[in-house]
Image (cartoon, rainbow, N blue to C red):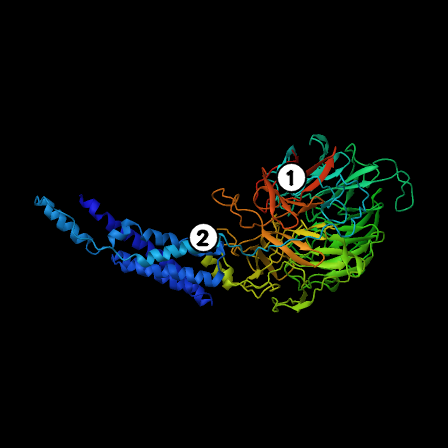
Amino acid sequence: MSTSTSRRPHKVLLFTGLLYSLAGLALAGGGLWLASLGGSLFYLIAGLGILLTGVLLVARRSEALWVYAAVLIGTMAWSIWEIGFDWWPLAARGDVIFPLGLWLLTPWIRRGLDPEYGRGFHRNLKRASAGGASARPAPVRRAGAGPLWIGVAAGVVVLLVGLVTTHNDLAGVIDNGTTGPAPQDYAGQPDEDWHAYGRTQFGTRFSPLSQITPANANQLKVAWVFRTGDVGSDQDPKETTFEVTPIKVRDTLYLCSQHQKLFAVDARNGTLRWSYDPKLYRNPTFQHLTCRGVSYSDTPAGSLDTEGKPVPAECPHAIFLPVNDGRMVKLDADTGKLCEGFGDHGTLGLIDGMGERTPGYYEPTSPPVVSDQILVVAGAVIDNYSTHEPSGVVRGFDIHTGRLVWAWDAGNPDENEMPSATHHYTNNSPNSWMTASYDAKLGLVYLPMGVQTPDIWGGNRTPASERYSSALVALDIKTGHRVWSYQTVHHDLWDMDLPSQPTLVDLNRPEGVVPAILVPAKTGNLFVLNRQTGALIVPAPETAVPGGAAPGDHVSPTQPFSELSFRPKRNLVGADMWGATIYDQLACRIMFHRLRYEGPFTPPSLQGTLVFPGNLGMFEWGGVAVDQARQLVIANPMAIPFVSTLIPRGPDNPAAPNNAHPSGSEVGVQPMYGSPFGVNLHPFLSPIGLPCKRPPWGYMAGIDLKTMKIVWQHRNGTIRDEAPLPIPIKMGVPMLGGPLTTAGGVAFLTGTLDYYIRAYDVRDGHQLWQDRLPAGGQSTPMSYAVDGKQFVVTAAGGHGSFGTKRGDYVIAYTLQ
């Protein structure tokens, strides 16, 4: 035996001891910091135990195994006490400590810990040198590893129990049959069509087709793929997104791409019929390059415009295309040619009448509402850049001529004042950036409102601008006069606007059939109101919220909390922090305790405020899907906290733009020029970029409208496309895009971080089928039929700020 071989166990032991000492020192140091902030003492104690283990290993003392056994068993016991048998939080606490325990059980460590090992070896060496024929090793006393074996075995059992235990999910069945009020097709469209963004302007995202069922959904196959050829460039802003939901009229699909190029596609086979390029002016400083969809209108022969004049025969079937540089284009749906009699040769300039006219500051990103005479147009404005930004005015134009019929300016004391030579729309009025809903029978259009920008500072807002911020507003579509409104957040300082198209549904109530509107909010609340009167159907009591706004601002003492809600049932605590390892989980706990957080509506602060639900919201622009006959809602809420840190004015944060340009993003440092502070907005992530809040981060859920209860809820989506290895672990991931549901009892979703389209049984939410997409599917699918065959279509083109793969795909599925 060579001398180098004899020294190998000692070298391994020395290296291991030093490694454990450093690991323990780092954990103890972080644990001491956490303890000083009022957090858990576990990390300090565990770190000291690992440090002591390392010191004992260097000293070749077998007690190291006993000390580490205590660390391992203590970690398991503390983890179960703190978070139960939830596998992912368990893994974050044990994924370093458990492997380190296994290493201590290897022969290289256990032999080196034998105090007789070195002396026995040297005696053997002397005997061999003297030629002793019967030289044998001296007796070896093994280190006592029994407790460590017990700890490792206990860890295996705990992790296995965690793997088979379901946390945060809710099992249940919605079994209402089809006893609800018969759905009324207010758009007068055939069952096989999809004429509007939400199929009808009720925004239900429900198809009356029933060919695809839970029994055959697993037989869906790709029918055709259309590629737009539009995948973006380096001159695009970060928020360049392919969010479109196509519409289908007769045998043609209509859809728009990231740069608002319009395509008419054969619904049978996906071949191009015609296209139109509006030649979008674009700049990387724009906050958005997005087209969620287009709108369609029919003009029957003999129609009159809003002035009572006969409508010209041109463009009896028309498509309205919003363009992000501030235009609305009207085209002949059959030929793709501009409708010359509309606006200026087919185009409306939407910055007309604005006080601030910088390109990209006002962006129509969502399809307009259409009636037989009025086109209702709203748009996004740049967020958190300054107090001098375009108006969020909502306007009604003659759908045939483009003549301005009315204006509703939420920031103007005279809401309906029209522009003139002496008056422009009020800068910084609250806007409505998402598609509105429309009830033709009542003549009401329902606007989901945003907040006056800057979103995170409200010290200089006017009373007029506060009236309708983050509110649902019902307007008379003929006059633009407000009929009623309901505010979902008072004095909004968190960007908790209404991000989704409201959904209109008739409810079967004890008092009879009630015309209702469902309003998904970023807060996770789902407000349910009578759409005729604005009265609450589901109570939303005013509840006390944290106080203590930043200097110069104030907060509302209460906020409405709907009794139908996905908002967290309790405030976050340190135990809810997560990470890939115990170290970044510890870092998240330290960051959590350093932030200001007292639950929902904790005001923004210079200290940094944890905002949960976060600015991204539990609901986003995808909204919900409603099956009125079954009296159920399909939703896909998510839960990602954000951090909001106010930045005082100073050398690095000037009070005026100083030739600066917008960042082209809604996250990061936002200047909020004109207010006393800038703000740094970002998701609450660990040092290695993972969410600090433990999973799941996204769900599919079903609501019974008869009971107004969430009946089932299951984590949705995997980390296949985010993890270093493409392992489809179902953690429940964030989503952008909404659900589709069908009369066949099948719901569809594509918006998850992983690249899949999935089908679910609406009764209990269990997954029926999935297919891999070639790019990010951050869009809302739709369904139609042609030649007696039902199709499901989705766009897969990625999302810049979501970080998913770009593409230009529109994919149709059908039964094979």
User: Crowding near pointer 1: few (<14 within 10 Å), some, many (20+)?
Assistant: few
Q: Specify whether 128 is left or right of 222.
A: left
Secondary element type, mark 2: helix
As shown in the figure, which amino acid type bears the numbered disc 2?
Answer: Leu
As shown in the figure, which amino acid type bears the numbered disc 1?
Answer: Asn
Q: Quadrant of residue 1?
A: top left
Instruction: In the displayed orientation, state which residue is furthest to the left.
Output: 130
User: Which x, y percent locates residue 22?
Assistant: 34, 56
The C terminus sits in image quarter: top right
Q: Which residue is mark 1?
A: 216
User: Crowding near pointer 2: few (<14 within 10 Å), some, many (20+)?
Assistant: few
Residue shown at 49% from the left, 52% from the top: 164
> In the rendered view, would you say 799 is above or below 512?
above
Residue shown at 74% from the left, 32% from the top: 787
Which circle marks residue 750 in the picture? none
Which numbered disc flags the more N-terminal residue, 2 or 1? 2
User: Which x, y percent locates residue 649?
Assistant: 58, 60
The answer to the question of whether label 2 and label 1 lie on touching residues, with beta carbons closer than 8 A, is no
Q: Nearer the viewer, residue 24 or 713?
A: 713
- Please state the total of marks drawn on the protein image: 2
Observer able to see residue 467: yes
Which circle marks residue 160 in the picture? 2
Q: Specify whether 51 is left or right of 129.
A: right
